[in-house]
Image (cartoon, helix red, strand yellow):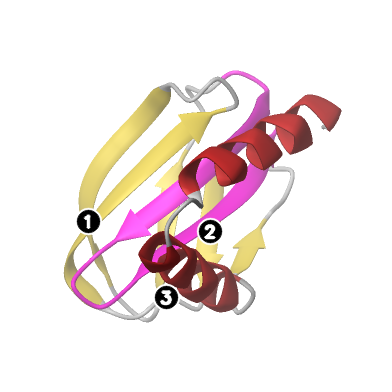
Amino acid sequence: MRLFLILTTIFLCIYSNTNAQNTIEHRIQKHTQNLKVFPNPATNVVNVLGLKNATNANITVVDTYGTTVLKHNWEIKNNAINIPISSLSSGIYRITIHSNEEHVQTKFLKK
């Protein structure tokens, strides 16, 4: 957990150099607070609620080293998605969801 916080802090310091980037990060952070991620920790599936419906959302899951471990294009229905994670190793992961309607990030722990 401590390593994740350190890496997150470094990531935010590197990528928050411009005002435009700061504005984007503020919008991402503000919307992320409305998301519900469960179960957390998860074993087979992680659910994300509070999303805006989208016909084509780009879903990316990244590990603590910044390696993309899952990438899918899915439709978001009923303001939610279910991401299968049974193939992932135990650890902390960041989910990025990008569509025409929104761009959000959140994290979860895989048991």
Q: In screen coordinates, is 5 left or right of 33?
A: right
Q: Position of residue 49 (x, y in %)?
A: 52, 72
Residue occupied by mark 2: 47
SS class, disc 2 = strand
Q: Nearer the viewer, residue 56 or 99?
A: 99
* Residue pictured at 25% horizontal, 78% vertical: 101
Sequence-wise, which precedes: disc 1 or disc 3? 3
**Residue type, numbered disc 1:** Trp
Q: Is residue 110 left or right of residue 85?
A: right
Q: Secondary structure at mark 1?
A: strand
Quadrant of the frame with the C terminus:
top right
x, y percent for residue 24: 41, 68
Q: Give the residues drawn in magenta, as a range.
A: 89-111
Q: CA distance from mark 1 to mark 3?
A: 13 Å
What residue is disc 1 on? 74
Q: Which residue is mark 3?
A: 51
Decide which of tag 2 and tag 1 comes sooner along the chain: 2
At 76% across and 37% down in the image, what residue appears? 5
